[in-house]
Amino acid sequence: MTPSSVIALGLALWASVASAVPADPLVTAAPSLEDLEKRATSCTFSGSEGASSASKSKTSCSTIVLSDVAVPSGVTLDLTDLNEGTYVIFEGETTFGYEEWDGPLVSVSGTDITVTGASGAYLNGDGSRWWDGEGSDGGKTKPKFFYAHDLTSSLISGIYIQNSPVQVFSIDGATDLTLEDITIDNTDGDDEGAANTDGFDIGSSTYVTITGANVYNQDDCVAINSGENIYFSGGVCSGGHGLSIGSVGGRDDNTVKNVTFYDSEIKSSQNGVRIKTIYGDTGTVSEITYKEITLSEITDYGIVVEQNYDDTDESPTNGVTISDFVLDGVVGTVEDTGTNIYILCGSDSCTDWTWTDVDITGGKTSSDCENVPDDISC
Ligand SMILES: *[C@@H]1O[C@H](CO)[C@@H](O)[C@H](O)[C@H]1NC(C)=O
């Protein structure tokens, strides 16, 4: 080609591109090179330096890949205050050094954050180093696992957690947070002294959705101390204490409102459906629905409401009200040593309960229920 034909071709291409692409109204000021690099930067961290490097560089990366990171003892994998829109991807095995401390092992906060696990990735708490049968009530101080605090419009998806020392997900101060396809596998702890390994502890949060969780643990699958507009569906809970509201009372925030547990299975657990409110305290529990919940091999109570937690020698108190408590299609079996339904309400604190298609069999019928609301049978 002659130089002039190159120019002509160039002009023709320029003309066709220019005509095909409408003027971009958003291009007012050119972003700085630094801004562009930040937006597009994917950073990969690995090994024993990975956690500290990730924490230092976290606001310079639009995507943070944590590949086989070995978090040192006594250190949080600190992913708090991420830039809006940051992606975090766990790859391979994430490990944590041993120390007796409160944790958390991992902490994430920010707005429009996405945390995912690559195929085969897992966070290995290696909890047996701490398990001593005492959970958070004594013995060794054990680190909590994963703080999902102050997350807004965010998603945590496909995370696999193995052998947590004690409580797993702490969800607090979250707004519009979805957790999907989370697996918590603490089955090793059944025989090795794991305790208080709650799957999801929720407080002071609104619009939290948990779908497709698989939780094998030794305490509540879900425990909601406070919060509103919480939805849990498609879950399997095994080995623990069931799907729980509470304990409610005695904290800064003692309101639980509009919670739905839907289409889930609770097996080999102490309890199925549970509401526990603290003796002598005040608060409000309202608009609670359990719909299409299947129970099997429940050892203690299929359905249990206790308004004297955690002082079972005392009579239930009225300070925390439980209203609009709906059960719809809660069915299944309790072991013959357990009790199908147990309701211990204060004298006028349980109102407007609607139970339909509740069929729990296999266990004992309690004769100790108190202040059972109208149309409900114990
Ligand atoms: C209750 O919570 C659900 C789930 O977050 C939400 O979709 C629904 O709008 C809430 N209902 C009310 C009355 O706020």
Image: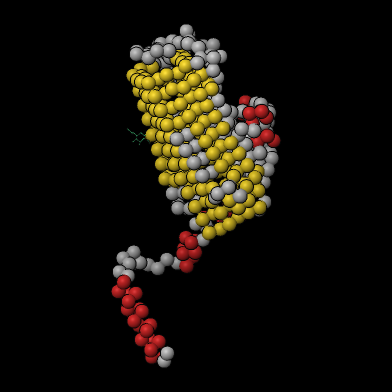
Q: Nearer the viewer, residue 284 or 275?
A: 275
The image quadrant in which ligand 1 is located:
top left
Q: Position of residue 310 (x, y in %)?
A: 53, 18
Q: Work out whether residue 105 can be spotted.
A: yes
| Residue 59 versus residue 36 in the image, above or below | above
Report the residue at 56% width, 54% height from top: 65
Instruction: Give the side of residue 197 with respect to residue 360, left or right.
Output: right
Percent position of residue 349, x then y: 39, 16
Q: Position of residue 191 (x, y in %)?
A: 66, 28
**Total count of labels:** 0
- Report the residue at 38% width, 34% height from top: 229
- Tell me, yes or no, if residue 255 can be seen here: no
| Residue 334 relative to residue 49: left or right | left
Looking at the picture, the colour scheme in use is: secondary structure
x 45%, y 18%: residue: 360
| Image quadrant containing the C terminus | top left
Tell which of 7 and 87 is nearer to you: 7
Residue at x 42% of width, y 90% of height: 1
The quadrant holding residue 97 is: top right
Q: Work out which residue is located at the far top of the displayed protein and give it.
A: 367
Relative to residue 109, is residue 256 drawn left or right? left
**Between 94 and 348, which is closer to the camera in this rendering?**
94
Q: Residue 162, image x and y in percent?
A: 60, 39
Residue 210 vs residue 113, the one in the foreground: 210
Please state if 280 lies on the left or on the right of 91 as rendered: left
Q: In this picture, is 107 found above or below 315?
A: below
